Structures are given as structure tokens and as C-alpha cells.
Amino acid sequence: MHDKHCASVHPERQPSMAECQGHSTAFAPRAAAVKSTARWRLLDGILPSDASVILAAAKPRHLPANSVISNQGDPADYMFLLTKGRARFFFNTHDGKKVLLFWLTPGEVFGGMALLSDPSCYLVSTESLKNSDVLVWDRNTIRSLAVKYPRLLENALTTASEYLAWYLATHNALISHTPRERLARLLICLAEAIGERTLTGFEFDVTNEELANATNLTPFTVSRLLSAWQRDHTLGKRRGKIILKSFDRLRQYTA
């Protein structure tokens, strides 16, 4: 039933983490995978003793960079919590275009469709951008935990609502903001979400092609805008990386 329901959703499919067990992914030591839960919103408001039970029910896995964790259209049989590294949602269109969506940082949950009572499919694909660790719950396990600990489901719904708010803001930007505003807003968002503080600013990994895809701009337009912002020292750039030097100056371009 799953396959019939989900088959038309993913035109260009890649092997997922669940299919690559024993190949590109491997079990990671549980102690190494679970270091700090302070920033894991999935466990907000849950007693430490109960949180320990929830975490103990998950399987820790390590993924190398550029691994597909889950595929759009596949049965939502697992829910994931990113504990280390970085990941990203993306969507493959029927004409083969890869649309980049939401960047994920440690503490983010994905695969929440596994919590639904009716068997469902993943709406988007998820890939690791760096060597990453995740905690994985199978569908039956996470649904049983959600019944035992209702706050777990509330926290998952909160995460889903935040993702929806992000997509609404993104859609609004695409239809009402100029190219310069769209790119400036995305750079600020990425710097705040995945930037690492350095002596010269906030550095994060992103290519011109990825920026163009995420903002629905051409690579030429992205390159032109970035070059202008380099000249006025708003940001610095080197291969595959951007260093945001001035949030205030870049925010001037979002108005």
C-alpha cells in the first residue's frame, strides 16, 4: 500500500539511509551520539528521566557528508533527530531540477510524518552536508513514545509549524521581494543558523549555485550581488564559503 501511494511523488530517487545500512552508514556509539540535549526542542518540557527513555529507544547512526538520509515519496517509516553536523531538505521536480529548501542544524527534527496515525510519505528529501550523526526512531516506536509522553508530540507539532512559517516567508519573498532583498535575507538567515564565528565575521559553507537555487535567481545575478557586497566590505568570499562581516550593512539591503 505504501509503494502504490508514494510512487508518483519522487521522480528522481536516490538510495536513502535506510536502504544503505551496512554500506554508507554505520552504527555510532550511543554515548558519542548523545552529548547534550539542552538545545533539542524535541525534548522541551520533558523530564530528564523521561527524555532518557525516549533517547534510549532511538538508534544512533553516523552519516558521511553528502548522504541522502530520506527520499521524498518514500514511506515515512522513520523519524530523525540531527545531533551533529548539518543537513538540508530538498525537492526533486518532475523535470529533474533539485530545489534546495531548509538547512538543518543540530537539534532539528525531520521525518515527522512518521508520527501520523495513517501511513504517510516523506514530502521532501533530506541530505547530510557534512559528516553528521542522527538519532533514528522507527514509526511504531516513536508513535508509542508520543502516546506515553504527549509533550513529545506537541514539540514535534511546534517544529512543523516553524517549518511552515519559514516556507510561507520564503514564498512571500519570492513573489514580493527584489533579487537583492531575497539574497540578503537568505545570507542573514544562513549566517544566523549555520555560521561559525571567526575573527572577521560569521563563516558558512554555501556555493553561488546553491544561493541561486534557494532564491530563484540566476548564478550570474548572485555573483554580481556578492561581488558588490565584497567591494563594500559587507562580506568576504572564498571557494564554497562566505564570511558575513557586517549584519547591519547587509540588513540595509533587505528593506
Image: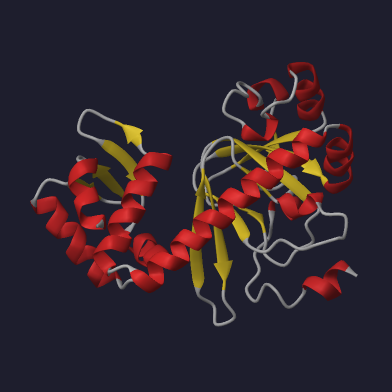
Give the image's coloring scheme: secondary structure
Q: Is residue 107 left or right of residue 181?
A: right
The residue positioned 24% from the left and 64% from the top of the image is 180
Please provide percent x and percent y for residue 154.
73, 40
Whether 247 is drawn above or below 173: the answer is above
Whether 51 is drawn above or below 66: the answer is above
The residue positioned 85% from the left and 36% from the top of the image is 145
Q: Is residue 61 left or right of residue 236?
A: right
The answer to whether residue 216 is seen in the rendering is no
Q: Is residue 168 left or right of residue 139?
A: left
Q: Quadrant of residue 38?
A: top right
Please provide percent x and percent y for residue 238.
23, 48
In this view, the residue in front, 84 or 14, is 84
The residue positioned 8% from the left and 52% from the top of the image is 231
Please provide percent x and percent y for residue 211.
35, 60
Q: Is residue 68 left or right of residue 243?
A: right
